[in-house]
Amino acid sequence: MRIRLIPIIFIFILLAIAVRLFWWQVIKGPDLARAAAVQRNSVTQIPAERGSIYASDGKVLAGNQPGFLLFASPVDMKTNPRQVANALAPIVFAAESEDRNSFTLNKDQKLPDISQGGLEKEIEDSLNQKKSSYVPLAHRLVQKYVDQITALKIGGLGFDPEPRRFYPEGSLAASTLGFVASGPNGDPQGFYGLEGYYNGELSGQSGLERIERDASGQPILIGSFDLQPPSDGRSIKSTINRFIQFIVEQKLREGLQKYGAKKASAIVMDPKTGDVLASVTVPSFDPRGFSFFNKDFYTDGVASDTYEPGSTFKGVTMAIGLDTGTVTPTTICPVCDKAYHVADHDIQTWNDKYFAPGTENMTTVLEHSDNVGASWVSERVGKDMFYKYTQSFGIGSKSGADIEGEQAGVFYDSTRHIAPIDLATMSFGQGFSLTALKMSQIYGAFANKGVMYQPRFVSQIIDRTGNISLPTKPIGQLVKPETSSTLTTMLEAAVENGEARRIIPHGYRIAGKTGTAQVPIAGHYDPKKTVASFVGYGPVEDPKFVMLIKYTEPTASPFAALTAEPTFFDIVKELYPYLGLAPTP
Amino acid sequence: LTKEETHRPKLVLPLLASLVATLTLVLFVATLVASNTLATEGGSTVDVNAEVLSLQNENANLEAQVASLTSVSRIYNEALARGYVQPDKVMYAAPTSPVALNR
């Protein structure tokens, strides 16, 4: 009887095994296969390389350099955290100090102190998170520091790629370039300037690598392999000439200090293409350590800061007067012998000085920067025609330049709200605002036979398939070529016979105009604060550049003729030999 | 049946058994060798990838170094350090033709 039971027991056992096998193989089979695949398959994200930004000569302004994030896995660490921190701190301290020492700081700026002891404590605290398997310890280390840490042979430490944005020219053109920081998803993202405007082009798209690995993490050669390669970001070639940028930046920093200004901006543009050759704002920041700088310094003041242009706008008023045939260079201003009465207001000259009847013509109106003469011209042109011209110049609109944060400024949206006094003040640059970029664009048209170009900061987009050249964009013929030629002669006279005639170097034929505008505050003008600017182009025979210099609230002198204009000519003296130009003997 | 004919099946069976055993052994060894090779080659692939990455990084670092050395501020400071000074006045030569060309 017992013998007979044995086969029955075996049959039951076999049945149980068969049922269990059916359960694992058939019912749970797909789940187990998936779980095994998850264990075996490793998926790695391959970050796309961010595109570089080149200067007009093809040299790198912002590129990439390998960098590494040092992390620890305290769970796997066998060495005492204090000993590890003690060994790592000097290396991490050296790496951070090297970075910080390379930053270009603004005057009187100091970086918050770091100490080796403080770093050691921070590292030790991080390592004491015993249950963590991933604790970042130091960011964007360069290879030599990675090698030093690797040589310590401390288990439980590792490195992840964390590329560094690299700026071989340091803080040069920082406000034009912008910077790269972590975006909302933790991915690198460009902010401000070209990094911000062209972020879509520069970023690229990361790829994925799926590979089967064995228990020790080594790839299985006959296993499945799937690669979606990353699409690297495109590079851009800017129109910035790094030599001109360097000259202008250097002179503007000197000027900022010399004239005690709160801020200074400058732009140099090629009037025949709209290419921005230099764009400077100081004080600025260093993109390598942007977080240590005031956020107000991040914007490109040339494109983002609006201001009342003041007397530099008299050049525009005169262009309208000439182009409409209302005035000629010799037209006498019949009202320039005293303050001009407009709708219960008296328009005065900047120095309250007036001219004998019949002696002030349109050329001398510009030379003397005569508010009365400019008001008279605008009145003769008429509100509707004057407004029509300002609209064709694009005043109150953005220039359309390819840079993040460009502002349009404030201007009248129709002639309905322009009262006679508004037209009068508008003629000498009060009551509305624009940017230095827009103003230099308009003067660029005067330099270029009346044809205005859209300013541009980038001339080429470069990817693996080749270069895409971006076309220059002419906006149109704003004033007749004759107007441009006549105005140039008048503006040249304004420079040669203007307030700053004694400081102007001989032989540099420049057409330009100063502007000293008061700063509007809460409905009135601050009596002490000014924005001093000078905009001009040269050489007048065949203009190669248009340049605008602007100081905000200079304290050494409120006048442009004593601040912005000398800086302009300091730069011109360096620009001429660089551009292969010679002053007229 | 002769004496030889009755002995033949007895010889075939052990032969077959030893053949299967040998084959199994060979296959076992082959599997062992293949697994070992795969594991080693996987490691080599990792090593080669690491070397490629290291060379790429080294290349990028060298490019960065060259870019830094040719920066305007570095050239400017280097020139100053070597005693070059900016001229107070730039002299321009008149663009007249050489005498020989006028003849």
Image: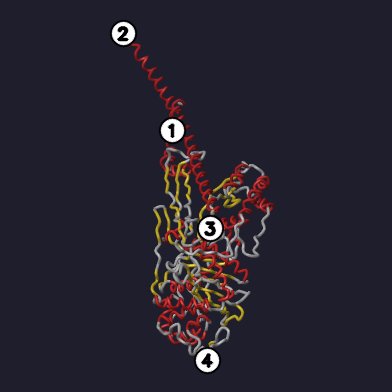
Measuring from the top left, give residue A122's x and y in whole percent.
Answer: 65, 52
Q: Between residue A190 and residue B99, name the one nearer to us.
A: B99
The Cα–Cα distance between marks 2 and 3, rounded to whole angstroms, is: 94 Å
Callout 2 touching callout 1 (CB < 8 Å): no
Mark nearest the camera among 4 and 3 is: 4
Whether callout 4 and callout 3 share a subunit is answered yes
Mark nearest the camera among 2 and 3 is: 3
Chain under numbered label 3: A
Measuring from the top left, give residue A568's x and y in whole percent.
Answer: 54, 70
Instruction: Say which amino acid is labelled 1.
Output: Leu
Instruction: Say which amino acid is labelled 4.
Output: Asp
Chain under numbered label 2: B
In the rendered view, would you say A395 is above or below A35? below
Whether callout 2 and callout 3 share a subunit is answered no
Instruction: Say which amino acid is labelled 3.
Output: Ser
Instruction: Say which amino acid is labelled 2.
Output: Thr
- The label number, if any, that marks residue A14 in the structure image: 1
Q: Earlier in the sequence, mark 4 or mark 3?
A: 3
> Can you identify the residue that label 4 sits on?
A344
Q: Between residue A347 and residue A512, name the one nearer to us.
A: A512
Q: Between residue A219 and residue A53, name the one nearer to us.
A: A53
Q: Residue furthest front?
A: B103
> Can you identify the residue that label 2 sits on?
B2
Looking at the rendered structure, the secondary structure element under dot 3 is strand
Q: Earlier in the sequence, mark 1 or mark 4?
A: 1
Measuring from the top left, give residue A179's x and y in whole percent.
Answer: 53, 60
> Can you identify the residue that label 3 sits on?
A182
Q: Between residue A395 and residue A128, name the one nearer to us.
A: A395
The Cα–Cα distance between marks 1 and 4, rounded to whole angstroms, is: 113 Å
The Cα–Cα distance between marks 2 and 1, rounded to whole angstroms, is: 48 Å
Looking at the rendered structure, the secondary structure element under dot 4 is loop
The Cα–Cα distance between marks 4 and 3, rounded to whole angstroms, is: 57 Å
